Image: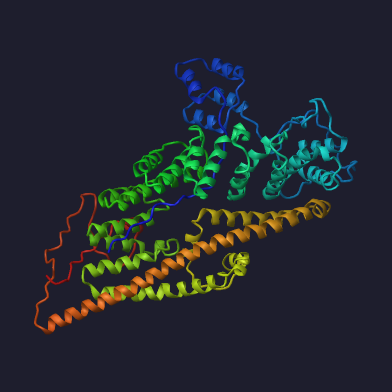
């Protein structure tokens, strides 16, 4: 039985965003350092260059061992894309009533106050006004409160101005600073809502290029890129802020990939700078596209480049994401070789996936299929035994493993083992299949699909009822990055609701109530989308399980037929012999020790199991 593993699908990982340097590069600075140019001269060159530097440049210089003075100079010239700066901020008097009607919250910002996060902002002129134009007094007070790191006070003033439409010609600025205040309070979804309102004013408004990078950063916190990709597709690439071009080109390429516009996707991915954190992700996605287009050599080249990446990561999350891309690239190369029936090469690349990888169990399973195709049946059984260990029971949903085990035993004519394996398979997976099939039927109609939020709550609400579905199935569902991002985003909204309820009454009754309504509407929208994605994934798994259950019945029929043939041969006096009666050779690598298995699983033994079965078939 030949089984071809499908080509890899794209995996969207949570992203850590950073900008790109403008002129003086890391390599140019390190060239000066490496030829022993005095640090004071290097620092002077940096200061006089007028260049701004990004997190990529700082990371590069740190990894290359640049002197502390040089690192400090670069830090001092880091890009500030967070917002335009305000001049001569007017700070309201402490604990006094202001003309906007609110009271100062200084010294008592309650939950969410993040001291030290605010930046003094220099204002940009609104479109059509001169640079020395001053804001109305109430708006100045609101911005001054923000600059004084009092985001509750600032957001209250700004919300009142927005609600009353006090300064229609200043709406972009009010929206932007309201978003900034909520961002400082770590109310990221509320901030996202108002940043999007800024973008709706168009690329000509002076706050556009500051709001868009903030949305990129917020996508990192929410784990959900869907809204951002929708926005990016509506903005001309010519209007992308320089500090976020690579990130936005990557997202646009990802959006085009999702729309099956593969050539357009590659064109945008080609625009991602090699200096950007997005470059490795862009290479990986290009490999996926080449694979989908049938350009296998190009796909292998792209995946190989990713697998060989040795870039450094600033955070643990970045490191995990980079390692995941490397491991997925190895898996995809192996799958390509498997698809063209170069099983030895496929086996080699599956073996390259490290044991500590999230994808190692899947590599073991797909490697087991490869060894089955190579007729190395005892190694196949050993890899399947690894997957059957308790270490993976709650994390890996691989219902096909018992079917492969049964097929392997069939090749060895171990019919009693086949019957046992398939009986256990039916016991474990028939109830799962029946529950999902019945559940999906409820949402199969047009009316049912409108209730996708209820479908989501059935399995993801805190008080969801009991289910026969194993934990490993939900782990598999959440490996769909879109669904995982939506689940994280919904959880962030729920935390934000708690944060709002904990604020002072005056703020909560004004800004808080408006935010709670926005959060409730958006949570419903996100649940609808998450429910649709979940139903799609569950439909795929249900069909997959249905196919496996059908295969199980076919194998049972073949076993019954083989047993009838054996009985017929015995009745006619035909002698049955073991096909392979050679003694088992226990010689192994000098680095390994052979030890009989006693059904105790040890983690350091996983992946090394080998069976000693010999075929009991007629010669």
| 183 left or right, relative to 484 | right
- Position of the N terminus, as image quadrant, is bottom left
| 169 left or right, relative to 541 | right
The image shows a total of numbered marks equal to 0
Nearest the eye: 307 or 125: 125
**Residue 552 x/y as whole percent:** 34, 72
Nearest the eye: 239 or 67: 239
| 611 left or right, relative to 322 | left
* Residue 531 visible in the current orientation: yes
Residue visible at 68% across and 47% down in the picture: 192
- When the figure is inspected, residue 61 is found, relative to residue 236, above or below; the finding is above
Q: Which quarter of the picture shows residue 560? A: bottom left
- When the figure is inspected, residue 94 is found, relative to residue 601, above or below; the finding is above
**Residue 239 x/y as whole percent:** 63, 34
Residue visible at 67% across and 35% down in the picture: 209
- Position of the C terminus, as image quadrant, is bottom left
* Residue 313 visible in the current orientation: no
**Residue 453 x/y as whole percent:** 62, 64
Residue visible at 81% across and 43% down in the picture: 158
Q: Residue furthest bottom?
A: 571
| 362 left or right, relative to 96 | left
**Residue 138 x/y as whole percent:** 86, 38
- When the figure is inspected, residue 327 is found, relative to residue 495, above or below; the finding is above
Nearest the eye: 259 or 559: 259
Q: Which quarter of the picture shows residue 220? A: top right
Q: How is colour applied across the structure in the image?
A: rainbow
């Amino acid at each position: 039985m030949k089984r071809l593993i499908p080509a890899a699908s794209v995996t969207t990982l949570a992203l850590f965003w950073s900008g790109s340097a403008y002129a003086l590069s890391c390599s140019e600075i390190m060239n000066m350092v490496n030829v022993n140019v005095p640090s004071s001269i290097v620092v002077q060159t940096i200061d006089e260059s007028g260049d701004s530097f990004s997190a990529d440049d700082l990371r590069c210089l740190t990894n290359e061992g640049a002197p502390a003075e040089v690192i400090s100079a670069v830090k001092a010239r880091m890009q500030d894309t967070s917002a335009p700066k305000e001049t001569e901020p007017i700070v309201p008097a402490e604990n006094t009533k202001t003309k906007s009607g609110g009271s100062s919250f200084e010294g008592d910002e309650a939950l969410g106050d993040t001291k030290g996060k605010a930046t003094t902002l220099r204002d940009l002129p609104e479109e059509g006004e001169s640079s020395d134009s001053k804001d109305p007094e109430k708006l100045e007070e609101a911005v001054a409160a923000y600059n004084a790191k009092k985001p509750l006070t600032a957001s209250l003033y700004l919300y009142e101005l927005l609600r009353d439409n006090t300064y229609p010609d200043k709406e972009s600025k009010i929206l932007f600073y309201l978003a900034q205040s909520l961002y400082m309070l770590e109310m990221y979804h509320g901030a996202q809502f108002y940043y999007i309102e800024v973008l709706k004013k168009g690329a000509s408004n002076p706050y556009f290029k500051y709001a868009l990078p903030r949305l990129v950063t917020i996508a990192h916190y929410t784990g959900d890129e869907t809204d951002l990709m929708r926005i990016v597709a509506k903005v001309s690439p010519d209007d992308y802020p320089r500090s976020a071009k690579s990130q936005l080109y990557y997202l646009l390429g990802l959006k085009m990939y999702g729309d099956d516009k593969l050539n357009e996707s590659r064109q945008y991915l080609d625009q991602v700078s090699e200096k950007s954190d997005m470059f490795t992700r862009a290479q990986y996605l290009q490999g996926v596209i080449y694979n989908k287009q049938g350009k296998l050599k190009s796909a292998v080249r792209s995946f190989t480049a990713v697998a060989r990446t040795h870039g450094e990561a600033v955070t643990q999350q970045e490191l995990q994401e980079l390692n995941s891309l490397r491991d997925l690239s190895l898996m995809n190369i192996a799958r390509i070789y498997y698809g063209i029936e170069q099983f030895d090469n496929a086996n080699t690349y599956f073996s390259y996936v490290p044991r500590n990888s999230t994808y190692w169990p899947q590599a073991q399973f797909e490697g087991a299929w490869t060894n089955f195709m190579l007729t190395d049946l005892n190694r196949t059984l050993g890899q399947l035994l690894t997957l059957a260990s308790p270490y993976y029971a709650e994390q890996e949903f691989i219902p096909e493993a018992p079917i492969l085990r049964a097929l392997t035993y069939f090749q060895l004519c171990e019919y009693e083992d086949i019957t046992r394996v398939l009986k256990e398979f039916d016991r474990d997976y028939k109830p799962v299949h029946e529950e999902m099939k019945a559940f999906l039927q409820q949402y199969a109609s047009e009316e049912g699909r409108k209730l996708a939020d209820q479908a989501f709550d059935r399995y993801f609400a805190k008080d969801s009822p009991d289910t026969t579905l194993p934990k490993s199935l939900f782990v598999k569902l959440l490996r769909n990055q879109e669904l995982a991002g939506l689940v994280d985003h919904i959880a962030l909204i729920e935390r934000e609701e708690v944060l709002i309820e904990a604020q002072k009454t005056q703020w909560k009754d004004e800004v808080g109530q408006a935010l709670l309504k926005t959060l409730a509407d958006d949570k419903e929208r996100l649940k609808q989308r998450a429910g649709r994605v979940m139903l799609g994934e569950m439909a795929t798994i249900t069909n997959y399980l249905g196919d496996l259950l059908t295969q199980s019945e076919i194998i049972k029929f073949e076993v019954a037929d083989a047993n009838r043939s054996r009985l017929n041969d015995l009745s006619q006096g035909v002698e049955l012999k073991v096909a392979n009666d050679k003694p088992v050779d226990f010689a192994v690598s000098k680095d390994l020790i052979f030890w009989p298995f006693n059904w105790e699983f040890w983690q350091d033994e996983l992946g090394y199991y080998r069976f000693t079965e010999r075929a009991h078939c007629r010669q």
